[in-house]
Image (tube, grey):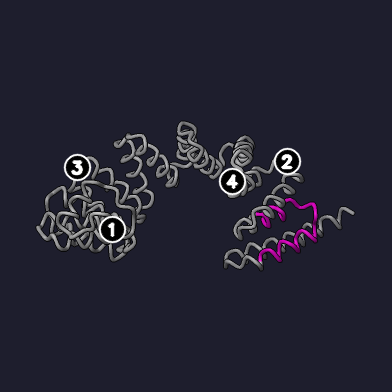
Amino acid sequence: MVVLVALSACTASRHISRGIGCLQYDDLDGAIESFNQAVEASPDFSEAYFHRGNTWLKKGEYQKAISDFSRAIELDPDYADAYLSRGTAYIEIEEDQQGLSDLSKSIALKPDLLSAYFVRGVLYQKMGDTDKAMTDFDHVIKIAPDRAFLGYFKRGMLYKEQGKMDAALADFSRCRLINPSDPGIYIQQAEIHLLQKKYDQAIENCRMALRIFPLVSSAYRIRGDALMGKEDYDLALWNYSEAIDIDPDSPGLYIRRAEAWKKVGNTSAACKDFKRACQMMKCDNNELLDWMRKYCSFPSSF
């Protein structure tokens, strides 16, 4: 009997290895098939259910994933990673309290489980509990400071929301040390420098972001705003136009470019951009409407 159990476990392990290999090539259906075979070979092998559950999670089959994670936990009540994965699945179906319970259980079982702190921090942030979110991101950073990019980034975003701009900039700088090739870091720093009216620094941040990925419309938009602050209206116009080429469905970009056209005295172009923006969104800015009615042959009933 012992020999048969050992053979079944060995067979299941081979199927699991094959399934993991399928996942490396994004062959989710092939992975499911292999994990099914692992479950058939050894129905009490918790690892088989865990890996199949994670594959269901990737496929967006959240109830099937929860069922498999629950079975893995039933077989191994101390399976911290299964609690983490089940908690993630619960969050995907908006069952946040159950997700929170599972994430906390996974941390209780495995206090250095980096992903659990991060996912729970994001969940706390979603639930509006900023202090607990900050504590969890602190744990992510404490556990692995050399690879805690997301911990620093999310904490930086929280600092930014709280108006703690220097602390946010410090965290984004740490992100840059870990992964200098992420344009999002430079965008966040540029936004803060723009708020601080440090226009040259904002422009440099945008330059770095665009050097990494030239199709970031927000980098052109922020650089345009900084140039407006520096009263370099012609160059601001060019940046807003570049942003519009990338994101032509953003009414805010047309409004920004229209304001730049006003600064250089091109009323006709400003009217055209304002009208385009008003076609894309509800125009309820009285000052803007009054200006358009005065200069743009804009219908008084609009």
Mark number displayed over residue 77: 2
- The foreground one among 235 and 292 is 292
Give the labeled residue for mark 3. Answer: 197
How far across and down, in percent of the image, does residue 247 sit? 32, 62
Give the labeled residue for mark 1. Answer: 277
How far across and down, in percent of the image, does residue 234 sit? 13, 59
Amino acid identity at mark 3: Lys
Magenta span main SS: helix
Label 1: element kind? helix
Most extreme residue toward the right, as rendered? 1
As displayed, is residue 78 above or below residue 258? above
**Label located before the other in sequence (2 or 3):** 2
Label 3: element kind? loop
Going 47% across and 42% down the picture, which residue do you hit? 144
Label 4: element kind? loop
Give the labeled residue for mark 4. Answer: 94
- The foreground one among 37 and 297 is 297
